Image (cartoon, rainbow, N blue to C red):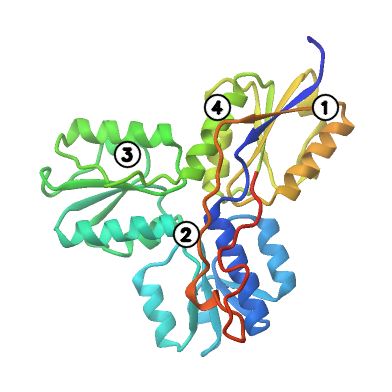
Amino acid sequence: MKGQKKVLLAAPRGYCAGVDRAVIAVEKALERYGAPVYVRKQIVHNIHVVTELEKKGAIFVEEVDEVPSGAHVVFSAHGVSPAVVSAASDRGLQAIDATCPLVTKVHREAVRFARDDFEILLIGHEGHEEVEGTAGEAPEHVTVVNSPDHADTIEVRDPSKVVWLSQTTLSVDETMETVRRLRERFPQLQDPPSDDICYATQNRQVAIKKVAVGADLVIVVGSANSSNSVRLVEVALEHGAKAAYRVDYVDEVKQEWLEGVETVGVTSGASVPEVLVTEVLDELAGAGYRDIEEVRTAEEDLIFSLPKELRQDATGKRDERALGGRGRA
């Protein structure tokens, strides 16, 4: 009915299996070893998650040389280069690797193609932690490609031995456009053995595409340094949303965004706990948007095992949370 206020709630949204695993890894490390436990970089790109873990005793650092010798350090879900692993070892740190297994897969692909002397065109954002970690596996073989336009200027040593890999959290459409333009220049460009963009990133983009078609406004809950959250805003605008904004917290939602708006789409990035989405929905309900329709495009039931150091409790018994598995939407 025209004039009826409603919410289109995207699903899947929020925590993915890799984020779930990484956050639980820090929580379990704190339970097992006591505070403080150090974490290199943000464990996941969400300010709320980081703040809550800090309250429990996690200390976030930029590099391992800030960690006291012999202390426990967790590597973030975005992965690290071999140089970081080596630096942690040199300091005698007790390292726990919470790298998402899907990121680890891309690392292994980089090692394999470098061993076969391929030039690797890594599609991703220069300076992003994941890109730095993957490139660090074979720095002499990797060239980062930042965008479709950048693809038009890339030069390679041997056009017959080129392969593309990608950051796992990119826009699927933009990545495929980058690949298309690379292949125009390098017809023998090889594909990775399996899709590098993670299932969660793809699923959240598919869901918001469906929501955006019928939304006057889309609100994406997620942090500014979360690549997949930022992409969701862009995807919403590209697929029909009249306006789209990203917020960390409900108090960032501006009342003027709602002026003249009948339908609001809501989603969240893959590192966002559901409580933050619930707070946005409560705020929208107070503004008259009480009719909530879930738009579900996929079911997610993937669960990753915790890092091996955390699969048993202090007595040696298998921990009940060894598989992670916090609820996801």
* Residue found at the far top of this picture: 2
Q: Position of residue 102 (x, y in %)?
A: 42, 55
Earlier sequence position, callout 1 versus callout 2: 2
Type of the residue with mark 2: Cys
> What residue is rendered at 25% in x and 62% in y?
111
Q: Which residue is mark 1?
A: 289
Up-down relation of residue 150 to residue 92 (above or below): above
Q: Which residue is mark 4?
A: 209
Say which mark, if any, is on residue 30.
none
Q: Is residue 280 above or below residue 24?
A: above
Q: At 37% across and 67% down in the image, what residue appears?
A: 81
Q: Earlier in the sequence, mark 3 or mark 4?
A: 3
Label 3 Cα crowd, 10 Å radius (few <14 / some 14-19 / many 20+) = some
| Callout 2 secondary element | loop
The answer to whether the residue labelled 3 contacts the one labelled 4, judged by CB atoms less than 8 Å apart, is no
Residue for badge 2: 100
**CB under 8 Å between discs 4 and 2:** no
Q: Nearer the viewer, residue 269 or 252?
A: 269
Amino acid type at circle 1 is Tyr
Which percent across, then down, holds residue 40? 53, 71
Q: Pointers 2 and 3 in contact (CB under 8 A)?
A: no
What is the C-alpha distance between the residues marked 3 and 1? 42 Å
Say which residue appears at 52% left-offset and 56% top-offset.
18
**Mark earlier in primary sequence (4, 2):** 2
